[in-house]
Amino acid sequence: MLELRDIDVFYGNIQALHGVTLRVDQGEIITLIGANGAGKSTTLMAISGIIPPRRGSIRFENGEIAGLAADAIVKRGLCQVPEGRHIFPDLSVAENLDMGAFLRNDSRGIHADREMVYQMFPILARRRNQPGGTLSGGEQQMLAISRALMARPRLLLLDEPSMGLAPLVTRQIFDIIQTINKERHTTIFLVEQNANLALQVAHRGYVLENGRVVMQGQAAALRSDAALQKAYLGI
Ligand code: ATP
């Protein structure tokens, strides 16, 4: 569904990604793990068109998307939930959700998806008229994911959804990620520093170090890899 082949990404003269190659198949949850500064967010920004790669190809559903504008990429069904959530603090929960549907004009479908989101996150239904900025961190993360779902993405890109959240809330968010994958048949690319949790929900994973993929495989195999356990899982 998504294939990155040999991509190099630069910030000015500084090279952040070196020949990154990875693929996401339809129906999978793929996680990209790595330490601070490894290049995880940069990979996501390259995919979603915010920082185009200087070399290499990014194909989504058999079409080249490297070099396309970010909104053209969203239109193809690839939607990102950025790190730090970025909800609209002064808009209500319901208005934030509507912003996610701005490229759609099927009002019935939008209504049905709003109800689906409220079922998935009952707390958002209860707070639908409340400004987004007054929600807790976990609720804001739920809202950010829900807003992305309102675009009916075929591939959902999640950047560090556990960032700044208490362990119990994080667990809840990861359960929802699995539900979205199973019940909405949404393919998910999950960038996480919490490798332990990410490898529990993902099917496969890639490990990034200093802008290079240094390890990849089935999530269960990565979880039991001694070197990875030492470096990333704190075991
Ligand atoms: P984190 O979890 O801290 O966000 P990350 O794995 O997502 O880490 P990136 O944010 O992708 O890492 O950063 C990859 C590299 O690119 C780092 O060395 C970082 O310092 C560098 N970098 C990131 N943004 C910029 C920028 N705007 N200008 C210059 N260098 C940058």
Image (tube, rainbow, N blue to C red):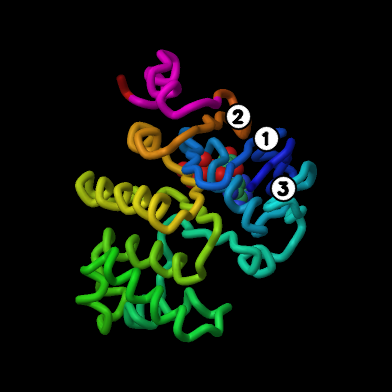
Spatial CA distance of label 1 from label 3 is 9 Å
Quarter of the image containing the C terminus? Answer: top left
The image quarter containing residue 224 is: top left
Residue 180: horizontal and vertical position, in percent? 39, 55
Q: Secondary structure at mark 1?
A: strand
Spatial CA distance of label 2 from label 3 is 16 Å
- Residues rendered magenta in the picture: 216-233
Residue labelled with disc 2: 213
Q: Is residue 102 visible?
A: yes
Q: For mark 1, does the 10 Å Cα neighbourhood hold few (<14), some (14 to 19), or many (20 or more) residues?
A: some
> What type is the residue that disc 3 sits on?
Ile
As for residue 229 lying within the magenta part, the answer is yes
Q: Is residue 180 left or right of residue 208?
A: left
Q: Nearer the viewer, residue 224 or 141?
A: 224
Q: Is residue 12 visible?
A: no
Residue labelled with disc 1: 21
Q: Main secondary structure of the magenta part?
A: helix
Taking the image in four quarters, ligand 1 sits in the one at top right
Q: Residue at x 59, y 59 (%)?
A: 78
Marks 1/2 in contact by CB < 8 Å: the verdict is: yes
Q: Is residue 56 left or right of residue 76?
A: right
Residue labelled with disc 3: 58
As for residue 222 lying within the magenta part, the answer is yes
Q: Nearer the viewer, residue 90 or 181?
A: 181
Q: Determine whether 85 is above or below 4 in the image.
A: below
Q: Residue at x 28, y 61 (%)?
A: 137
- Number of on-image labels: 3
> What type is the residue that disc 2 sits on?
Val
> What type is the residue that disc 1 sits on?
Thr
Residue 134: horizontal and vertical position, in percent? 25, 74
